[in-house]
Image (cartoon, helix red, strand yellow):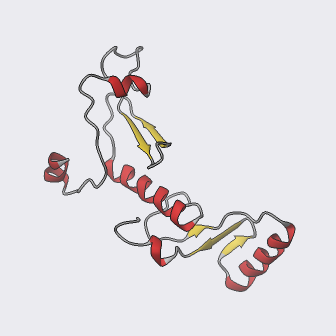
Amino acid sequence: MYDIHCKTGIKISFPIIADRNGEIARRYGMISNDISNTETVRNVYIIDNNGIIRTILIYPMNVGRFIPEIIRIVQALQMADCAQGSTAANWIPNQPVIVPPPKTYEKLIERANEVENNKNGISWYLSFKEPPEKCIGENNC
């Protein structure tokens, strides 16, 4: 992590696991026997506090990982969870989030009227909201 910071100026604020004997890599299927019996195929797993894998990125051995995108994914996951919404394609921190679709016809009508009045989307099925203040900031996103 220190080397990454020295070379790129990026401070990694999440754990990076050393797996000297390959036990974790084998457990999560990171060893591709088609390529090598000992080398990983540059997998990145983002695992939440509950031990649930939220994202898997698999890079070929000849392609490096893109740390800014990995950080953006962590931020998007945190924002979506905190704001109880979704992040759009090409989402970057502090942009609005997508409001979950309505679950009843009455809520659909309510949403359609809200979009019409507030111009905060294109239809009842795709509307946006600003993230709550508690979701914005260094600790959450």
Residue found 32% across the figure and 49% down from its top = 67
Q: Position of residue 138 (x, y in %)?
A: 34, 68
Q: Position of residue 44 (x, y in %)?
A: 39, 38
Pick out the residue farthest to the right.
Answer: 105
Q: Is residue 27 left or right of residue 6?
A: right
On-image quarter of the C terminus: bottom left
- Name above or below for residue 85 compared with residue 4: below
Residue 105 appears in which quarter of the rendering? Answer: bottom right
Pick out the residue farthest to the front.
Answer: 50
The number of callouts visible is: 0
Residue found 74% across the figure and 65% down from its top = 125
Residue 110 appears in which quarter of the rendering? Answer: bottom right
Depth check, front residue: 8 or 100: 100
- Name above or below for residue 80 compared with residue 45: below
Whether residue 10 is visible here, answered yes or no, is yes
Q: Position of residue 36 (x, y in %)?
A: 34, 15
Whether residue 40 is visible here, answered yes or no, is no
Residue 35 appears in which quarter of the rendering? Answer: top left
Residue found 33% across the figure and 34% down from its top = 63
